[in-house]
Image: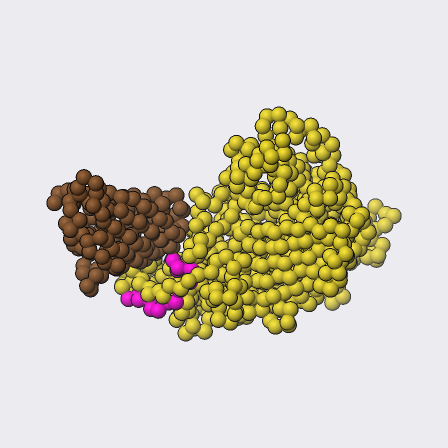
Chain colours: A brown, B yellow
Amino acid sequence: MAMTMKGEVALPADRQTVWAKLNDPDVLKACIPGCQSLEKSGENGFTAVVKLKVGPVSATFKGNVELSDLDPPNGYRISGAGEGGIAGFAKGGATVSLSDAEGGGTLLSYDVEANVGGKIAQLGARLIDGVAKKNADQFFANFAENVKAG
Amino acid sequence: MSAQGVGASVLRKEDFRFVTGRGRYTDDINRPGQAHAFFLRSPHAHATINRIDHAAASKMPGVVAIFTGDDIAADKVGGLICGWMIHSKDGSPMKAGAHPALAQGKVRYVGDHVAVVIADTYAQAREAAEKIVVDYGVLPAVTDTADAARTGAPQVHDIAPNNTVYNWHIGDKGATDAAFASARHVAKIDLVNNRLVPNAMEPRAAVGEYDDASDGLVLYTTSQNPHVARLVLSAFIGLAPEHRFRVIAPDVGGGFGSKIFIYAEETVCVWAARKVRRPVKWTADRTEAFLSDAHGRDHVTHGELALDAAGKITAMRVRTTANLGAYLSTFSSCVPTYLYALLLSGQYNIPNIYAEVDAVYTNTAPVDAYRGAGRPEASFLVERLMEIAARETGKDPAEFRRANFITAFPHQTPVILAYDAGNFAASLDSALKLADYANIGKRKAASAAQGKLRGIGFSAYIEACGIAPSAAVGSLGAGVGLWESAEVRVNPIGTVEILTGSHSHGQGHETTFAQLVSGRLGIPFENVSIVHGDTDKVQMGMGTYGSRSGAVGMSAIVKALDKIEAKARKVAGHCLEASPDDIEFRDGKFTVKGTDKSIDFPSVALQAYIAHKFNGQDLEPGLKESAFWDPTNFTFPAGVHICEVEVDPATGVTTIEKWTAVDDFGNLVNPMIVEGQVHGGIAQGVGQALFEGAVYNTDGQLVTASFMDYQMPRADNLPFYDVGTTNTPCPSNPLGIKGCGEAGAIAAPPAVINALTDALGHEDIAMPASPLAVWRAARKTMAMKTAAE
């Protein structure tokens, strides 16, 4: 069951700073909603444990996060897939691109697609769409806060 | 007709038990030491199973055992079977992919069974299942019916290239093509018969039990046909021989076909009970029912009807692709073939019919019989084509049908069936009157004045049910005979137990069967009890589906009652010192003709058992007889349903303003119960037409897996029905019964869509005609009106 979301967020920092944060596992861990651990497993790969609640289903997803199409300091693709046991699975990714914002700072645009299956998909599109959008918004809001905080 | 005999609307005996919570369903049964099963299901529609790690799960609290497909294979448990062989055009047998009760190496639909956890409690089993780690190799899925046979589509079973189960056909292609070549007019349609989820009120459940004293198995389960379940579990799946295997189907809360089949969960429960030496229980939750009950319908069809200059039908040509899901369910193969294409003649004289049916595998739940099974798909196609042909040739849809009705019986159709009796015009006339068809123009104008669109739609359906003569179905590929059995046990004080192979899961057999016996033997209705659903009590029987309990099940009781009466006459003869030939039996009394010497039925029963009045060597003591009845033909219920709708083009809401149903079910045993069956069938048919649709996305996720996304019809979606009957007794069984269980679901969908398309003024609407779909279609209507002005 696929969902797509697009958005952009203005960040009060230059592109180089934003890029560095986008590649910092600690920053990512702090920003991914429900992320309980994120450990480097390769040059651009991480293993992750993320706890998510979708309607009545609460599940811990274990999986991998990978950064690809790295184009410093202009953007990359972040993707992940996780199995949540009897709750099903979730996978998805975001293409993130950075550009100079008018009047200083950086504009981050994202294009997210997410896919779920099993029990969480059976909860129905209305519920899933809302949760996926909320989590994507939350991630980038957290990231903006983190950038602001320096 | 006695007050409680055949023909009386006796209130249902069983309802007090049901509505006061005293029913005894499978989930109400708990056995000492019982453990609970939880099935780990695939979240993927199509994947290899590379590894299953359940070491951590096995250590969880309360876990008794965890089994996977490896254990099923190691125990040589047979796969689930499809019991009806269909051959392709080229003579090759259908391609039946292996169907293990727990997946082996590959999963093929979301909900496929990967492992079973057995624990002290259900919660513990579920908790432990969370800890099972399955390494899946996810594969692309195929879900679309029309697309499944495409070259390059993901392959569901290696044994079935291009996902094709069979390419079947019926009829005379040459003669049909020739008739089309010389046709004056050809009406055409492309349609989808939407996939449905059965949604019985009671979900499936099972309690398996092993008895180590007898080395035997007991399975309590939600079955419409416990003997067939025992046969399959014994002879094919190989769990235990029949004489050491008892299947009990207690009260069952609705089946609609979905509880005919032998499923993985029930099989695993009884198999695992022997492995863990404890009873094992499983009850489906509603999501599991959505995912794993066999679904219904799911056809993509192109149909054509050829007319001559006089408006007579000369031929019909049909091409259908039927989605059978990821595995062949128990009777799935016969549904889109013999239960579908044999009905394509409808109520009409059609000299030439040719139909091709391709059945395909997809990564979706198995599809099998669901209320009507094949016949709703046929009647939807035939009645949509009839309506379109009438519209295109400028004929009144009722009179166009009448002009093509079969009027002489028996009538041999070009697609095997020989209709034995009917009077289609009588049903049409009665329905036209009840529906006030004469004034539809005024009602349409009144709706138009309020900015609404009103339409009227006809459905003159026929079905073949009471299935069926064993030799006939055998010649068509059935693996079983479709007779029914009955045993009549008269007790010494004259009360009677009827042991029937039919199974009631809502039909009211405890009432109707008792009516038959009460009327025939002249004993109080209350003195008759019905025993069914237990293979240790009831001799082999075939169960209930295809509207067969009346026509076949009750006919078997009639045959047994004939024997009871013959024996009782002999006993009465000894008591009255007269020849049995001189004795007449009426109103529960045996009387020597022309005298006042008589003895009542209970006294004869007592005399039969005490055996004081006759020599036990000449006449056996006791009063108990059994019979097997094999019908001589299918039965052919038929009728006319007329639906009148009003559409609000601003909101897309369709309101059913009026529903007229005139059905010919032959003789009626209990008119109230028959009317109830008609009401329920119409509600399910309206559900298919306006609300229900099971949808898989391209990944194979079922996106309509709850009542949030799968809409069932509700009381306020339905009108008060005007129900009438006509009565042409069925000549093919002793009671003249045709069967009524499926008629509403068969008749309703085309009536609704024909009414909607009449209201809309175009044919561009599919099932389910949801408010959004109707709103879009109504915008097209408004645009057409604007363009015309």
Q: Is residue B212 left or right of residue B1?
A: left
| Furthest residue in direction front, as rendered | A102
- Is residue B170 shown to the viewer in this render? yes
Location of the N terminus of chain B by quadrant is: top right
Location of the C terminus of chain B by quadrant is: top right
Q: Quadrant of residue B476 in the image?
A: bottom right
Measured along the vertical axis of the image, is residue B780 above or below residue B543? above
Tag count in the figure? 0
Q: Is B743 in front, or is B76?
A: B743
Q: Position of residue B577 (x, y in %)?
A: 82, 56
Q: In the rendered structure, which segment of residues is drawn in magenta?
A: B42-55
Q: Position of residue B127 (x, y in %)?
A: 31, 56
Is residue B485 rendered magenta in the image? no
Q: Position of residue B686 (x, y in %)?
A: 58, 42
Q: Is B161 in front, or is B345?
A: B161
Q: Position of residue B432 (x, y in %)?
A: 73, 36
Q: Residue at x 62, y 36 (%)?
A: B759
| Furthest residue in direction right, as rendered | B594
Q: Quadrant of residue A126 in the image?
A: top left
- Is residue B67 shown to the viewer in this render? no
Q: Is B465 in front, or is B137?
A: B137
Q: Residue at x 73, y 57 (%)?
A: B180
Q: Residue at x 68, y 41 (%)?
A: B458
Measured along the vertical axis of the image, is residue A28 above or below residue B781? below
Q: Residue at x 44, y 63 (%)?
A: B108
Measured along the vertical axis of the image, is residue B430 above or below residue B559? above
Q: Is residue A65 left or right of residue B289?
A: left
Q: Is residue B770 left or right of residue B285?
A: right
Q: Is B665 in front, or is B361?
A: B361
